[in-house]
Image (tube, rainbow, N blue to C red):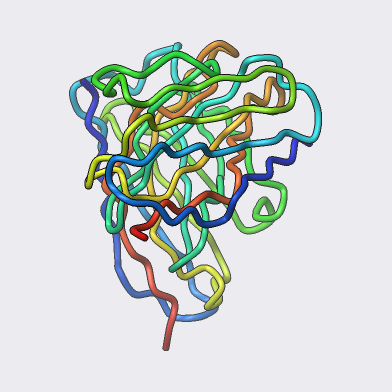
Amino acid sequence: QVHLQESGPGLVKPSETLSLTCLVSGGSISSSRDYWAWIRQPPGKGLEWIGNVYYNGGTYYNASLMSRLTMSVDTAGNHFSLRLSSVTAADTAVYFCARRGYSSSRYYVDSWGQGTLVTVAS
Amino acid sequence: EIVLTQSPATLSLSPGDRATLSCRASQSVHSYVAWYQQKPGQAPRLLVFDASNRATGIPARFSGSGSGTDFTLTISSLEPEDFAIYYCQARSNWPPEITFGPGTKVDLK
């Protein structure tokens, strides 16, 4: 069973860049069968998909975040990363890393990290 | 873009009650709907995929149904641990987005 663990600063200043890493264990990030995703949840609100990254570096981003977003994968370290620039208070959320299938038959998220709260404040 | 709506927003029930949660898609998604449960302070957990297939380890009191645009998650007899928020998600072939409904909160009456 794959295990996902987020890490990164819990506090980021407005206008700076939010950076998170998700370490994958119990499975390989180089699997061609999986997308690796970031999903966030503002306090008291619903789930918002941020983007997916594939083992070869291919990315698919939420259009509303695309201009500020960079996702990458490190196959040697078996982890993937998120960078969100020019953050504001609206980016305050719990950030989850997750796994979604690559094929259309595995469109659902079957593994989640525990989530990490990132607060944007000065 | 597929838009999902869920109803009701809140369902107030007692242990032992039957819970019926609805998810509606803005266009046909065939049978490609998943349901998740989220408890406070936890990540969501996959309950059902392909409208009616329970994920590994999910109790039989959870069942899903529907096709096309209308889907239902039923909890046959609520256990204390079932009070949570439930989200539906529909398949997006391309681009491979992950779009969730707004959620239904099942709380204690």
The image shows residue B22, relative to residue A119, as above or below, that is above
The image shows residue A105, relative to residue B14, as above or below, that is above
Residue drawn where x is 31% and y is 42% of the image: A22
Q: Position of residue A80 (x, y in %)?
A: 37, 38
Residue drawn where x is 63% and y is 36% of the image: B23
The image shows residue A51, relative to residue A74, as above or below, that is below
Q: Give the position of the C terminus of chain A as an image quadrant.
A: bottom left
Residue A25, quarter of the rendered image: top left
A100 or B32, which is in the foreground?
Answer: B32
Give the farthest residue toward the bottom.
Answer: A122
A106 or B106, which is in the foreground?
Answer: B106
Q: Give the position of the N terminus of chain A as an image quadrant.
A: top left
Q: Position of residue A31 (x, y in %)?
A: 38, 14
B41 or B52, which is in the foreground?
Answer: B52
Residue A75, quarter of the rendered image: top left
Q: Is residue B23 left or right of residue A14?
A: right
Q: How many marks?
A: 0
Residue drawn where x is 33% and y is 37% of the image: A112
Q: Is residue B17 left or right of residue A39?
A: left
Q: Position of residue A17 (x, y in %)?
A: 48, 67
Residue drawn where x is 51% and y is 57% of the image: B10
Q: Position of residue A120 (x, y in %)?
A: 44, 77
